[in-house]
Amino acid sequence: MNKRPEPKRFEVISTAQITPNMRRVSLGGPAMAQFPLQQDGGYVKLMLPGTGEKPPVRTYTIRRQTSDALDIDFALHGDHGSGGPAVSWAQTVKPGETITVGGPGPAKPLPPGADWYLVLGDMTALPAIAVNLEALPADAVGDAVIEIQSEADRQDLPHPEGVTLHWLINPEPGHHPQKFETFVRALPWRNGRVYAWCAAEFETMRRVRSYLRQERGLGPDKLYISSYWKQGLGEDQHRVVKRADAETVAG
């Protein structure tokens, strides 16, 4: 059994506003020398400043890893709908400050060999979606539906010419999950072997899961689906709800 890496203290190298509702914090320092290579799309646990006995911990995707930094992108619609510590930290942290980071955990890439790909998610999943689209072969085809808060939140994502990007505007993240579901249902269903990847808010995920599993018949070998957050809940509460939902589906 692989031993879980000990958390390490990273330094904030820089911050940048990527779009109105996406902020990037780049972490580096001496800890990078002990961090595994090629972890783009994997995740880390950020042990955020707090006043209680146990600091708040939040999970975030590694948008990009270079030789001297990890880029972590934060969707700024409140800390998963509650205006919590991760978003507050990302908006106020300054270069030179430090943070304890656990991980990395494994990425959830798109497997090779599908005839087409269906990639779905909201702004919390945008870093992982970006990594996955970049990794696709040049001749890949499919559709990617990405929910953002405004037109200004579109990003220039490298992707194969045969993959169509659909930007769905929702000014109220975590609300109106039926809008996302309706858009996905309206997409033409292509011929051939599909692989679908979806990460979004909990209620949105459940709606899309029902469509893809029950109506389109996609099993685990053709579908990765996960809720990254739930409207109104922090990460610990969301984890409890997510586990209960998974047990219900499995049962």
Image (spheres, rainbow, N blue to C red):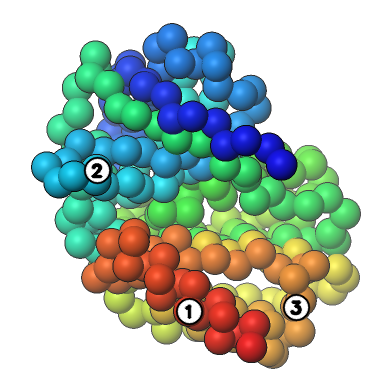
User: Considering only vertical position in the picture, is 230 above or below 57?
Assistant: below
Tell me the element at label 3: loop
Q: Which residue is mark 2?
A: 55
Q: Which residue is mark 1?
A: 244
Q: Amino acid at mark 1?
A: Ala
The C terminus lies in quadrant = bottom right
Which residue is found at the position 75% from the left and 78% from the top?
218
Marks 1/3: CA–CA distance? 21 Å
Q: Quadrant of residue 219?
A: bottom right
Pick whichever of labels 2 and 1 is earlier in the sequence.
Answer: 2
Residue in front for this viewpoint, 2 or 207: 2
Residue 62 in the image: x percent, y percent? 50, 36
User: Considering only vertical position in the picture, is 171 above or below 249?
Assistant: above
Question: Can the viewer see residue 148 in this picture?
Answer: yes
Which residue is found at the position 25% from the left and 54% from the top?
79
The N terminus lies in quadrant = top right
Residue 107 in the image: x percent, y percent? 62, 45
Which residue is found at the position 19% from the left and 28% from the top?
93
Residue 89 in the image: x percent, y percent? 21, 38
Residue 97 in the image: x percent, y percent? 23, 19
Q: Tell me the mark number nearer the camera, choosing from 1 and 3.
A: 1
Question: Can the viewer see residue 157 in this picture?
Answer: no
Pick whichever of labels 1 and 3 is earlier in the sequence.
Answer: 3
Marks 2/1: CA–CA distance? 25 Å
Q: Amino acid at mark 3?
A: Leu
Is disc 2 surrounded by few (<14), some (14 to 19) or many (20+) residues within 10 Å?
few
Marks 3/2: CA–CA distance? 39 Å
Tell me the element at label 2: loop
